[in-house]
Image: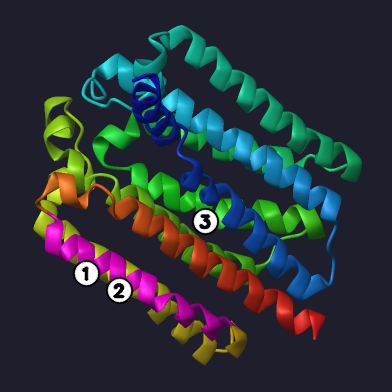
Amino acid sequence: MQEVAIAPKFKLWMAAIKPPMYTVAVIPISVGTAVAFSETQRFDLGIYLTFLGSAILIIAWLNLSNDVFDADTGIDKNKAHSVVNLTGNQSLVFWISNVFLALGVLGVVAIATQQKDPTLIGIILLCCALGYTYQGPPFRLGYQGLGELICFITFGPLAIAAAYYSQAQTFSTLGLAVGTLIGISTSIILFCSHFHQVKDDLAAGKRSPIVRLGTARGANVLGWATASLYLLTLTWVGLGVFSPWTLLVFASLPFAIQLVRHVQRYHDQPERVSNCKFFAVNLQFVSGVLFAISFTLPGLL
């Protein structure tokens, strides 16, 4: 009987911790580092690992603090896998999240101190500030349907620029182009997280994109957003911005097709569409890895 009770609790904690979601830290740092290597032939493993650890800690802060802020609005009252609901201690979760943030920023400060250049700190603090405005009071911009825009900027161009700068201590227009694609694939994850919680969002006054569009139109928007990853890649290869190596990303098409078909079929069935965000995570991770490989291989060969 005890084992039966433990299993569901473990599943709830795993859902609360969201291990797959940490790809939103791994992919931008890895791709930005790969782009820097492709253009400068520079790669510092210590900086990469430190920055990656910092990014993961900052995502942990973001996830935990969002649970805290959502508890204030009551939007998570039916969410069994909210960390606040699992612990019953909102204040404790809040302070643990701040410890993660402090440790993450400390890692970035260590890199900047080593390089004698504070630029990286400024970029990451801007990312953190934008991340706070997503759910944090008094902004709560996610409740106005602006979460995907914040996600796009933070985990796309800014994160890629930060990763690039950590290796090369300069910026790149190629990095900006790549950051656009990573921003799209990461924003798709957040977009997909809304399909199954329209009722709870409406009850809490959250005007998510799916609340505004409806699930049917939202499924169509998802299709076009997903297609844009491949259309933009083709365009930039054709214009000579990307090398032909980046066409490797088309190997992720099965994951894109799986995601779009699943949402189009079950967009109005909350229990069946709720797992689509994990399909989106798969797409973001696989496409991101392929982009990283496509920028690393030419330099190695």
Q: Residue at x 56, y 68 (%)?
A: 178
**Mark 1 element type:** helix
Circle 3 sits on which residue? 156
Task: Name the kind of residue labelled 1 in the image.
Answer: Arg
The answer for how far apart the CA atoms under marks 1 and 3 are is: 25 Å
Q: Is residue 282 left or right of residue 72?
A: right
The answer for how far apart the CA atoms under marks 2 and 1 are is: 6 Å
Q: Residue at x 39, y 35 (%)?
A: 15
Give the residues in magenta. 246-267
For the C terminus, give its image quadrant: bottom right
Q: Is residue 272 above or below residue 62?
A: below
The answer for how far apart the CA atoms under marks 3 and 2 are is: 22 Å
Q: Main secondary structure of the magenta part?
A: helix
Q: Residues within 10 Å of mark 3 (few under 14, many from 20)?
A: many
| Residue 257, disc | 2
Choose between 32 and 22: the one closer to the eye.
22
